Image (tube, rainbow, N blue to C red):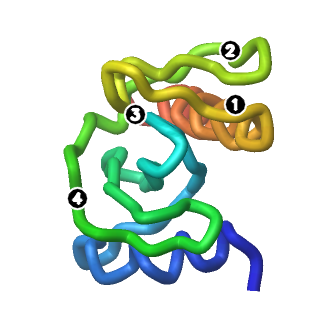
Amino acid sequence: MSVEDRMRSQAAPYLESGETIEVVFGALVARYTDTVVVVTDRRIIVFDARSYVHVNIKGVRKELPRSTRFGTPYGVFYPVPMVGESEVVPRKWFKALIAADEAEDTRGETSPT
């Protein structure tokens, strides 16, 4: 089972009825304080985790509106202040950040106005 699959599996009990996961990724605060970010079709859920590599979700730290944008990642560690004041996302998860923004862009284009 991949790290992403484990993240999805551990986040599933926190989802609302009918809510689906679009993207998951990990972020770091310090060497031993990790974060799992789950982007759903309705919201973004930020979880405290013992380790995003071994995926041990401890609980919800905060929720963000689904309209939250992460921007175009750069460098080795991309800062994501909307997730946490000193949170960074390692390069490994850059494609997930881009996919989260693209999914929201697509939803906005297809929404009836």
Instruction: Tell me where residue 31 sits by quadrant.
Output: top right
Task: Give the residue pinned by disc 1.
Answer: 98
Verify CB contact (< 8 Å) between mark 4 and mark 1: no
Q: Earlier in the sequence, mark 3 or mark 4?
A: 4
Spatial CA distance of label 4 from label 1 is 23 Å
**Left or right: 14 as drawn, with respect to 104:** left
Verify CB contact (< 8 Å) between mark 3 and mark 4: no
Neighbor class of circle 2 (other Cα within 10 Å; few <14, some 14-19, many 20+) is few
Quadrant of the image containing the C terminus: top left
Spatial CA distance of label 3 from label 2 is 27 Å
Quadrant of the image containing the N terminus: bottom right
Query: SS for tag 4?
Result: strand
Task: Give the residue pinned by disc 4.
Answer: 60
Spatial CA distance of label 2 from label 1 is 7 Å
Neighbor class of circle 4 (other Cα within 10 Å; few <14, some 14-19, many 20+) is some
Task: Give the residue pinned by disc 3.
Answer: 112
Q: So how many labels did they put on this image?
A: 4
Mark toward the viewer: 4 or 2: 4
Q: Whole-percent x and y of residue 99? A: 69, 39
**Amino acid type, label 2:** Thr
